[in-house]
Amino acid sequence: MADSTLHNSPDDAPRVLLLSGYDAASHKRWRNQITGMFGDYHWQTLALPPRFFRWRIRGNPLSWLNEPALQECWDLVIATSMVDLASLRSFHPHLTQTPCVLYMHENQFAFPVSKKQSSSAEPQMVNLYSAISADKVVFNSAWNRDSFLEGAWTFLDQMPDGVPDGLIARLRDKSRVIPVPIEDRLYAERRKPYNRDCPHLLWNHRWEYDKGPDRLLKLLQVLDQRALPFRLSVVGERFRNHPKAFDQIHGQFGHRIEQWGFLESRREYDQLLARADVVISTALHDFQGLSMLEAMASGCVPLAPDRLAYREYVPELCRYDSHEQDAEQEAEAAADSLEAMLEKGASACPPEGWRASRLAGDYQSLFQHLIKTGAGKS
């Protein structure tokens, strides 16, 4: 069941074990980037498929219990946020002597729970125990870090007794932010001028409720009521059971649609990013926002709510007022911001600090420091 990959390297290269406990598309992309950035390391990767979430987040140490790689000695272990690192190190005691990085793509304290799901403290406990066990905790955005620490504090504050003093401060001290990199190839000079008279709007997110497709529908309806011309592309990873808002958008605005559905070809997707004028987010949850960052790197002007990680890279002019409890009011605010952007001539704002070539040094200094100092000495 586990996907095990070995990357060959020189005999004296640092030996690094990378564990992905729930290998979703963004997690797989990140681990491929990291192993590609540091090709001179000796990498071993263990990855579990992204299904059966409840079992996966709690059961990955059992799934890997007999993995030969976990019996070996490593210079560094890197685990993603779905890995139960505390249990894993207890099952394999020699790993307590190996420095471990926990990379937080998301955190369960701020993760949305759908109406069909029941909330559970167990995934949150896995995140918390793993962060305590790790030597360094790395987040893909400051919002992810802050929501984790705030959520953990609130969670522990509800406990009746026995909570250690200073735990959140210690977690903060060993936390840092290094985003998932955006490939340099996407930062290409834009070849065509923006169409401000009839902008090509792009919505490029997972087709799930937490990405706010109902809010996109309301925004498009407001633009239509205001007689603001636009063309539309709605793409992204889609699922058999997707929110009904997508069918409503397709039915009501089919005459404006340029591209619809998931693009299998990465080349076609990159070409779409280069053609679009404005990339839109209506998300209620986004721990970093890779799809927004990719589109911005490709020259799209962003339009995003004033919340989540967007405050870290979307200019103020391009952020609309957040009204999480009032989707209609938020749609009006988004339409106001779009009109202001078009009127004032908002320009492309590529997120230079998120370039892979710039972030490589941050990753390298972190890895080299841990390898040099060893576990518990960072």
Image (cartoon, rainbow, N blue to C red):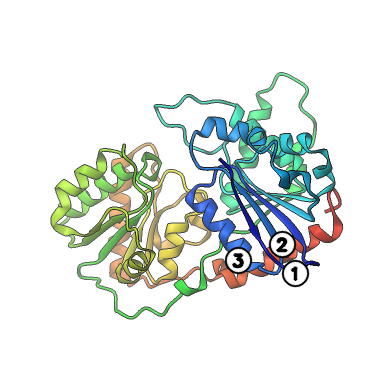
User: Marks 2 and 1: in contact by CB < 8 Å?
Assistant: yes
Q: Residues within 10 Å of mark 3 (few under 14, many from 20)?
A: few
Q: Which residue is mark 1?
A: 10
Q: Is residue 290 left or right of residue 65?
A: left
Horizontal side of 331 relative to 90 (left or right) equals left
| CB-based contact (under 8 Å), mark 3 and mark 2 | no
Q: Secondary structure at mark 3?
A: helix
Helix, strand or loop at mark 1: loop
Relative image position of residue 52 (x, y in whole percent): 50, 33
Q: Nearer the viewer, residue 171 or 128?
A: 128
**Residue 295 badge:** none
Residue tagged 2: 42
Q: Report the number of numbered marks.
A: 3
Q: Nearer the viewer, residue 100 or 147?
A: 100
Q: Earlier in the sequence, mark 1 or mark 2?
A: 1
Q: Which residue is disc 3 drawn over?
A: 36
Instruction: Please identify, in this view, whether the residue under mark 3 or under mark 2 is nearer the observer.
Output: 2
Where in the figure is residue 102, as x and y percent of width and height? 68, 48
Amino acid under disc 1:
Pro
In this rendered view, identify the residue nearer to me: 323 or 68.
68
Residue at horizontal 45 percent and vertical 71 percent from the top: 186
Residue under the image location 56 percent in, 40 percent down: 1
Q: Residue at x 36, y 70 (%)?
A: 346
Q: Is residue 101 above or below residue 277?
A: above
Disc 3 residue type? Gly
- Compared to 83, does 123 lie above or below? above
Looking at the picture, which amino acid does disc 2 mark? Answer: His
